[in-house]
Image: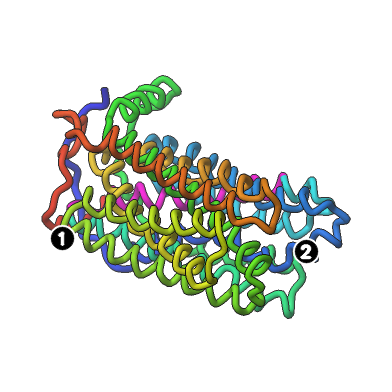
Amino acid sequence: MTETLAPVHRVRAGRALATLLLVLTVFGPISMDLYLPALPALTAELGAATSLAQLTVTACLIGLAAGQLIAGPLSDRFGRRGPVLIGVTAYVIVSALCAASPTVEVLIAARLVQGIAGGVGIVIAQAAGRDVYEGGRLIRFYGRLTVIGGFAAIVGPLLGGALTAVLDWRGLFLVLSVIGAVILAWVAFGLPETLAREARTAAGFAVIGRDMRLLFSDRRFVGSVVAQGFVYAALFAYLSGATYVLQGIYGLSPQGYALAFGLNSAGFMAFGYLAGRASERWSVLGTLVTGLAAAGLGAAGLLVAGLTHVPLAVVIVSLFLLAAGTAITSPPSTTLALADYPQIAGTASSLLGAARFAFGGIAAPLVGIAGSLSILPLGLVTTISILMAAASGLVFLARPARAHAPAGPTTIPSTEGTPTCVE
């Protein structure tokens, strides 16, 4: 069992550090969206089958999950600053390699590595947030992570669409490389080490295995991770299938689809922020249940739309509720999973992040089983996913957590903590 650590010397964290941590969550996921408008042109230039070209998206998704699993434990052992510098440097290099890829097979491999490098930023941001904040400010920070994720979902496709007017798909990957270079300079000069040397875990696979066994023995951690994984399965099913539903079935123009997608992303941002405040001021578990209920209503609406014809407004509202519900569940789930484990926050964060992308990666292809002109698979996948998330919460979170956690309080503090940063 991991021992409780002695207090370390801390200083107050500023707004600049919080902003940098939020930015670190963006550059990986934005890699998923920025080049999508140029995917047809990429497919034609490389002479690839459509299904093979779509593997460039899948490879990045798998990489984002794997990168978090790798970087999380490493950051607990070596600190946050070193792994993120390596990750962002690799991202800059491999994004340039994506731009120079001569074949789609090379691009798929490069996209996998690009995703791994991008996943480092996600897990380090969550783990460093646990180092830096506590109490109410920790919950609020995780709410802001959700908001910035929704912002990236809006900006990525819109920026990619605008850039395709002047750049080809290779140019878009060079833009990602430049973005990575800017973030690398920011990290090099603006990110202090947030995990004190005396707070780091020992090295070795045995220690990592011990930490993971410790986490998986905690009902609250398991419930948070599994429930969040199923919720994100529903979200990725929505992201994968919404374009076919809104454009292929309901005949929306690309501009109309962009408007609907932007509305849902704005809802994701707004409700993610509100969820952070509600978790802080009201109830962490209550906020999680509210999010599951909202997502469940949205999924049920999509299921009805798959069984019988409904107006477009019903589908758009259902997609909005699904996105908003996902955003509401994110801050409380992250808080429940990480709050008790400050000394292995990297490992805990990596498992949570990997579950989100892994569950999502499995669910996304299922919505196309019946072809591009049926809503029923989307309704079934989202409804089953939310039901499984609710069942996971009921099984693992309805009962009180075990009486003793290895470090940190066993209940989520309702009072504001002081934002801190290790010198």
- Relative depth, front residue between 307 and 186: 307
Relative to residue 94, is residue 237 drawn left or right? left
Q: Residue 40 shows which numbered tag?
A: 2
Give the overall secondary structure of the magenta segment: helix
Residues in magenta, as a range:
109-135
Mark positioned earlier in the residue sequence (1 or 2)? 2
Relative to residue 202, is residue 45 drawn left or right? right
Secondary element at tag 1: helix
- Relative depth, front residue between 239 and 415: 239
Count of marks, rendered view: 2
How far apart marks 1 and 2 lie (CA) works out to 47 Å
Residue 140 screen position, x and y as percent: 26, 60
Is residue 395 shown above or below 359? above
Does residue 419 show up? no
Q: Residue 110 shows which numbered tag?
A: none
Residue 320: which quarter of the image? Answer: bottom left
Secondary element at tag 2: helix
Q: Amino acid at mark 2?
A: Pro
Q: Amino acid at mark 1?
A: Arg
Which residue matches tag 1? Answer: 281
Residue 371 screen position, x and y as percent: 70, 52
Does residue 342 show up? yes
Within-10-Å neighbours for mark 1: few <14, some 14–19, many 20+: some
Relative to residue 38, is residue 363 drawn left or right? left
Rendered-image quadrant of the N terminus: top left
Residue for point 22% across, 55% down: 420
* Residue 113 belongs to the span the image colors magenta: yes
Residue for point 41% across, 39% down: 388
Residue 175 screen position, x and y as percent: 65, 68
